[in-house]
Image (spheres, rainbow, N blue to C red):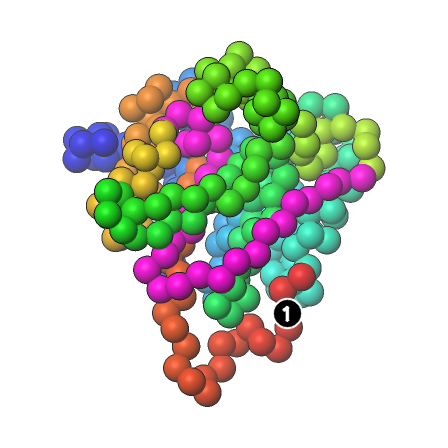
Amino acid sequence: MSEAKVREVSRHSGTIQRASEATRSAGATHPGYKREQNEDAFWADEQRGIWVVADGLGGHQAGEIASKTVVEEIQRSAATDRHYERALQRAHALLLGDEQNTANMGSTAVVVAEDGAYFHVYWVGDSRAYLWTPGEGGGQLKQLTSDHSYVQMLVDSGAINTVEAANHPNRHVITRCIGGSTNPKLEIDRVSSPWTSGQRLLLCSDGLSAEVESDQIARVLADNSDNRRAADLLIAAALDAGGKDNITVQVIDAPTPTPAGAKTGLSAQAVR
């Protein structure tokens, strides 16, 4: 994660893509070194308090279409009803009904929706959300999501431990995704929590979480208060680890406390 590595990443014109016009957050994506194209997608709207990372499955254009469909439905919901579980259900139905679809075309997704001093996380698959809290030794990085994956099922059952899971040959096999099957019912997990000034959320595809240890991620966040630089360094760390998959990250600052009596702009319509 040297300065040289950051410059090297930046030199790949058209390879690393970043979100613009953001002040509290930064997002970036990179195809990695092993994949011909990037099937990840991400989007953010700070004004509406919504962020999403989607990791497409299926290869060629199928994964790209799937992740784009997820993002488009989240965008549609952000502009209308702010019902993000319903948006993911719509994306699921669209992918199942797409005449180009096959059983392998789908997407994971992790969505964060801000609601005043609280946030809500919705997810399907193995894209993750972490909450970082500043402190000694790199601070505390807490994983908020639990992977919908075969290996996680083995860990939950006690069949293997987390060290064995990290090196399991089937660690990339997921058990739940948007689209990707003939099952019309999609289960979406959700967690909600308050957050305080100084904390940060990290959303990522498994191109980061499967390759970079949690303590290294925490150290990057601790040492780099600038979200743009933190996002670039996290991608650089995944590339240093081999860049075997598409890599997408979003780093989000907790909101500054709202003065008493001030309007947040989110109270008129609750996040659902």
The answer to whether one can see residue 14 in this image is: no
Examine the image and state in which quarter residue 83 appears: bottom right
Asked if the stretch drawn in magenta spans residue 128, the answer is no
Q: Please name the residue shown 68% across and 32% down the image.
A: 176
> Left of 162 or right of it: where is 132?
left
Q: Residue at x 81, y 32 (%)?
A: 183
Question: Are there few (<14), some (14-19), or many (20+) residues within 10 Å of tag 1?
Answer: few
Q: Residue 127: x, y in percent?
A: 53, 37
Q: Which image quarter is the N terminus in?
A: top left
The residue nearer to you, when weighing 133 against 71, is 133
Task: Left or right? Give the position of 92 relative to 129.
Answer: right
Question: How many discs appear?
Answer: 1
Check residue 188 for magenta coloring.
yes
Q: Is residue 195 visible?
A: yes
Q: Which residues are magenta?
A: 185-212
Residue occupying the point 57% across, 33% down: 147
Residue at horizontal 39%, vertical 82%? 259
**Regarding mark 1 in the picture, which secondary structure is present there?**
loop
Residue 55 sits in quarter: top right
Q: Amino acid at mark 1?
A: Ala
Residue 142 position in % (x across, y down): 43, 44
Query: Which is more toward the observer, 76 or 81?
Result: 81
Q: Which residue is mark 1?
A: 270
Instruction: Answer with the quarter of the image where residue 239 lies.
Output: top left
On-image quarter of the C terminus: bottom right
> Up-down: is 249 above or below 253?
above
Q: Residue furthest left?
A: 3
